[in-house]
Image (cartoon, rainbow, N blue to C red):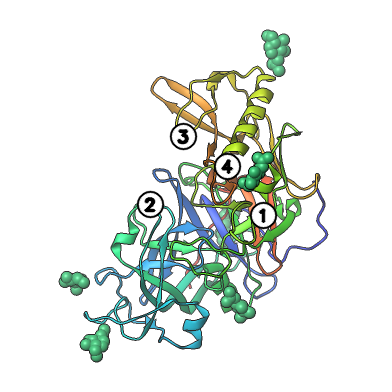
C-alpha cells in the first residue's frame, strides 16, 4: 500500500449503530462529523437515508444516488406540507447557476410544484431510468450530527435554504419502499454534500461507508477497537467526465458522477489482458472509464473486460480446487458453498485488484466484496458478483454497491481526489460499527 503524506481533514470515529454512514465535516475544529445514517433495502438493493425536511421538520426517506447532481422529493399536494418552502424566479442568478433549461408556469392551485415564472428542473430516477420536469424549491433541511465515544457533543446541522427539485408521485416508481425521492451526492454545486459543505464553510468532502448487514445491529452496542482508518486510506485522482449522462441532456455540462482512473485489473496479482482504450474516457462522447455507483448493486463490466476477467478468475480459482457449478442469475460464475473456504475477509477466492495508475496504488477486492452468497431451496453457492454490461456500455467499469460495502470511501471533491481503504474487515472492523447516538437539538 502506498503511504499517506497528507493529514485527513475529516476525523473519523468509529463506534456503532447504523448500517452505513455518510460523514461530512463541520467547521469547528476538531470537528464532529456530520452523519447521515444509510441503510440497505434488501429487496431493491438500494441504499437509503433519512433526512429531516420542511417546517415542521419531517423525516424524509430518500434513495441514494451517488452520482446525481441534486436531490428531489415528491411534492404532490398531499405529501408536501411545509410552511417554509419558496420558489426560485426564472432569470435570477440562482436559477442560472442551476443551469435550468426551463421556466414553469402553472394553472392549478398554487403549491410547492405549482407556481408561475419559476425555475424548473429535471429530476431523474436513475434506478428506473425515468425523468420529468418539476419546480425547483428551497426549504429547510436538517441533518443530525452523531456522537461518538472519543468526541462527545452533537449538533443538528440545519440548512434553511436547501435547494432541491420537486417531483410527482409517478417518479417514485422503482425506488425502495417508503422513499419520497432521491438524495443526490454528485459533484455538482447542489448535491447534499455540496450544500452542506457550503452552508458550514467546509471543504466539499464527504465519506461513505456502506454496510451490507441484513439488519441493524440490536442493542447492546458493539464497541470497536481504537482504529483510525484514515491512515489506511490510499488516494487516487477523481476524474471529471466532460460529458454528462442524464436523460434530459444538459448539453455541454460535465458529468456529476465520480470517475477514477483504473489502468489495469489483476486477479491473484496477474494482469487481466484488457483493451486499454476502454479504460479511458473519450473526451468527446464521455464513453469509457470507471465510475463508482450506488445505483448498480454489482460491478458492471463491458463484455470484453467481463470475459477476460472471468476467465482469469476461474483459472485462478481452479488453482484453489474450485470448480464452477450451475450459475444463478444474474451471475455466471458460481461455486458450491461447500467447496469455498472462509477467511476474515470473506470466502477464500482469488483477490482482485483495480490498479490505479501505478502498480502500488490498487483497490484490493477480497471475497467478502467479490462474492455473493445465494442460498435458497436446493441451491447454496457463492457467485462472482460482477455482471456483463454488454459490448458498448457508456462506462466500461461501473463499481457497484456490493463491491463498495465495508470499504471506507472518501470523496474529496475540493482536492479532486478519492480515498479508499479496501476492505476494512482486514482491520477487524466493519462499516456497521459506528456509534450513531444522535442527540436532537
Ligand atoms: C391533489 O391534486 C390533484 C390533481 O392535481 C387533485 O385532483 C386533488 O384533489 C388534490 N388533492 C388535495 C388533497 O388537494
Ligand atoms: C399563473 O398565472 C396565470 C395567468 O395570470 C393564472 O391564471 C394562474 O392562476 C397563475 N398560477 C399560479 C399557480 O399562481
Ligand atoms: C455512543 O455515544 C454516546 C454519546 O456520547 C455514548 O453515551 C455511548 O456510550 C456511546 N456508545 C458506544 C457504544 O460507544
Ligand atoms: C460551483 O460553484 C463555484 C463557486 O461558487 C463556481 O466557481 C462554479 O462555477 C460552480 N460550478 C458550476 C458547475 O456551476
Ligand atoms: C478497443 O476498444 C475501442 C473502444 O471501444 C475500440 O474502438 C477498439 O477497436 C478496441 N480494440 C481492440 C483491439 O479490440
Ligand atoms: C487441490 O487438490 C489436489 C488433489 O486433491 C491437492 O493435492 C492440492 O493440495 C489441492 N490444492 C489446494 C490449493 O487445496
Q: Please report the residue visible at 39 percent of the width from the left and 64 percent of the height from the top.
A: 60
Image quadrant in which you'd find residue 311 = top right
Dot 4 surroundings within 10 Å: few (below 14), some, or many (20 or more)?
A: many
- What residue is disc 2 on? 176
Dot 1 surroundings within 10 Å: few (below 14), some, or many (20 or more)?
A: many
Task: Tell me, for residue 330, which label it has, or none.
Answer: 3
Residue 349 seen in render:
no
User: Left or right of 417: which side holds 61?
Assistant: left
Q: Pick whichever of labels 4 and 3 is earlier in the sequence.
A: 4
Provide residue 308's location: percent of width, then percent of height. Answer: 64, 33
Q: Please report the residue visible at 67 percent of the width from the left and 59 percent of the height from the top.
A: 12
CA separation, marks 4 and 3? Answer: 15 Å
Q: Are marks 4 and 3 in contact (CB under 8 Å)?
A: no
Q: Which of labels 2 and 3 is toward the front? A: 3
Q: Are marks 3 and 1 in contact (CB under 8 Å)?
A: no
SS label for mark 2: loop
Provide residue 280's location: percent of width, then percent of height. Answer: 68, 52
Q: Are marks 2 and 3 in contact (CB under 8 Å)?
A: no
- What residue is disc 4 on? 302
Q: Pick whichever of labels 2 and 3 is earlier in the sequence.
A: 2
- What residue is disc 1 on? 260
Q: Are marks 1 and 2 in contact (CB under 8 Å)?
A: no
CA separation, marks 2 and 4? Answer: 27 Å
SS label for mark 3: loop
Q: Pick whichever of labels 3 and 1 is earlier in the sequence.
A: 1
Q: Quarter for ligand 2?
A: bottom left
Image quadrant in which you'd find residue 103 = bottom left
Front residue of 139 and 156: 139
Q: Are marks 4 and 1 in contact (CB under 8 Å)?
A: no
Amino acid at each position: 500500500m502506498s503511504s499517506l503524506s497528507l493529514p485527513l481533514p475529516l476525523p473519523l470515529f468509529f463506534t456503532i449503530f447504523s448500517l452505513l454512514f455518510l460523514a461530512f465535516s463541520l467547521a469547528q475544529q476538531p470537528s464532529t462529523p456530520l452523519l447521515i445514517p444509510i441503510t440497505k433495502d434488501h429487496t431493491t438493493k438500494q441504499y437509503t437515508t433519512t433526512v429531516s425536511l420542511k417546517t415542521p421538520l419531517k423525516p424524509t426517506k430518500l434513495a441514494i444516488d451517488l452520482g446525481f447532481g441534486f436531490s428531489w422529493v415528491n411534492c404532490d399536494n398531499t405529501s408536501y406540507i411545509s410552511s417554509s418552502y419558496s420558489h426560485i424566479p426564472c432569470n435570477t442568478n440562482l436559477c442560472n447557476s442551476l443551469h435550468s433549461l426551463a421556466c414553469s408556469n402553472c394553472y392549478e392551485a398554487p403549491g410547492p410544484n405549482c407556481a408561475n415564472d419559476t425555475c424548473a428542473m429535471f429530476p431523474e430516477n436513475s434506478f428506473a431510468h425515468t425523468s420529468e420536469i418539476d419546480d425547483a424549491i428551497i426549504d429547510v433541511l436538517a441533518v443530525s450530527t452523531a456522537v461518538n465515544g472519543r468526541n462527545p457533543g452533537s449538533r443538528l446541522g440545519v440548512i434553511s435554504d436547501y435547494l432541491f427539485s420537486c417531483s410527482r408521485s409517478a417518479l417514485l416508481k422503482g425506488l425502495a419502499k417508503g422513499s419520497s425521492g432521491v438524495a443526490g451526492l454528485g459533484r455538482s454545486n447542489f448535491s447534499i454534500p455540496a450544500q452542506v459543505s457550503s452552508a458550514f464553510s467546509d471543504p466539499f468532502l464527504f465519506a461513505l461507508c456502506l454496510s451490507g448487514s441484513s439488519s441493524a445491529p440490536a442493542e447492546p452496542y458493539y464497541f470497536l477497537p481504537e482504529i483510525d482508518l484514515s491512515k489506511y486510506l490510499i488516494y487516487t485522482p477523481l476524474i471529471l467526465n466532460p460529458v454528462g449522462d442524464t436523460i434530459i441532456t444538459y448539453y455541454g455540462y460535465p458529468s456529476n458522477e465520480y470517475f477514477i482512473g483504473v489502468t489495469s485489473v489483476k486477479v491473484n496479482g496477474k494482469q487481466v489482458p484488457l483493451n486499454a482504450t476502454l479504460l479511458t474516457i473519450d473526451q468527446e462522447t464521455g464513453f469509457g472509464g470507471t465510475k463508482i455507483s450506488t445505483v448498480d448493486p454489482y460491478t458492471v463490466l463491458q463484455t470484453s473486460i467481463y470475459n477476460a476477467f472471468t476467465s482469469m478468475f476461474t483459472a485462478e480459482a481452479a488453482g484453489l480446487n474450485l470448480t464452477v457449478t450451475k450459475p444463478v442469475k444474474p451471475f455466471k460464475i458460481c461455486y458450491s458453498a461447500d467447496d469455498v473456504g472462509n477467511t476474515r475477509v470473506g470466502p477464500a477466492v482469488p483477490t482482485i485488484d483495480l490498479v490505479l495508475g501505478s502498480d502500488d496504488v490498487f483497490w484490493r477486492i477480497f471475497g467478502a466484496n467479490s462474492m455473493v452468497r445465494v442460498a435458497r431451496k436446493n441451491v447454496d453457492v457463492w457467485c462472482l458478483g460482477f455482471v456483463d454490461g454488454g459490448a458498448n456500455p457508456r462506462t466500461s467499469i461501473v463499481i457497484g454497491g456490493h463491491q463498495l460495502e465495508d470499504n471506507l470511501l472518501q470523496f474529496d471533491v475540493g482536492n479532486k481526489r478519492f480515498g479508499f481503504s479496501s476492505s476494512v474487515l482486514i482491520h477487524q472492523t466493519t462499516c456497521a460499527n459506528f456509534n450513531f447516538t444522535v442527540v436532537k437539538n
